[in-house]
């Protein structure tokens, strides 16, 4: 089973020059919120090209982190769980 089962957390993405969006993970289910969260458990910062590459399946969140195309500003453990969920 995925490590996100039984957990609830929010991951916010701040996209340079574009704004923010969030994903709420609730017991392994992923919910998209087109706005920023009041108190995200994790904050990930990246540029629009990186968001597009991840969305198109050309780049994984893990690869983007390793290539320093994105940065975890807070909540690394939650970002790691989120990365496993969307893998």
Image (spheres, rainbow, N blue to C red):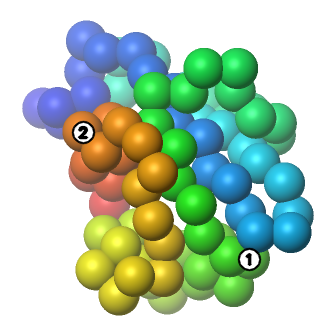
In-image side of 62 versus 43 (left or right): left
> Which residue is labeled 2 in the image?
77
Outermost residue, left side: 1
Q: Quadrant of residue 45?
A: bottom right
Q: Residue at x 25, y 21 (%)?
A: 5
Quadrant of the frame with the C terminus: bottom left
Please report whichever mark, 1 or 2, sits nearer to the chain's N-terminal start. 1
Could you say where residue 78 lies in the image, as x and y percent from the top left?
A: 32, 36
Mark 1 neighbour class, 10 Å CA radius: few under 14, some 14 to 19, many 20 or more:
some
Could you say where residue 7 lies in the image, as x and y percent from the top left?
A: 30, 15
Q: CA distance from mark 1 to mark 2?
A: 23 Å
Outermost residue, right side: 18
Residue 32 or residue 74, whichever sits in front: 74
Residue 12 or residue 57, whichever sits in front: 12
Q: Residue at x 52, y 37 (%)?
A: 11
> Which residue is labeled 1 in the image?
48
Could you say where residue 18 lies in the image, as x and y percent from the top left?
A: 87, 64
Could you say where residue 13 lies in the image, as x and y percent from the top left?
A: 62, 51
Kind of element beneath mark 2: helix
Q: Residue at x 73, y 63 (%)?
A: 15
**Residue 30, numbered label:** none
Q: Residue at x 25, y 12 (%)?
A: 6
Quadrant of the frame with the N terminus: top left
In-image side of 23 versus 84 (left or right): right
Q: Quadrant of residue 77?
A: top left
Residue 77 in view (yes/no):
yes
Residue 79 or residue 30, whichever sits in front: 79
In-image side of 4 versus 52 (left or right): left
Residue 56 in view (yes/no):
no
Mark 2 neighbour class, 10 Å CA radius: few under 14, some 14 to 19, many 20 or more:
few
Compared to residue 30, the image places residue 58 above or below, namely below
């Amino acid at each position: 089973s995925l490590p996100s089962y039984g957990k609830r957390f929010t991951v916010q993405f701040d996209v340079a020059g574009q704004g923010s969006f969030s994903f709420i993970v609730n017991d392994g289910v992923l919910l998209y919120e087109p706005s920023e969260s009041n108190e995200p458990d994790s904050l990930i910062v990246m540029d629009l090209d990186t968001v597009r590459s991840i969305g198109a399946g050309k780049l994984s969140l893990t690869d983007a982190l390793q290539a320093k195309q994105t940065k975890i500003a807070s909540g690394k453990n939650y970002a790691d769980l989120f990365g496993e969920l969307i893998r």
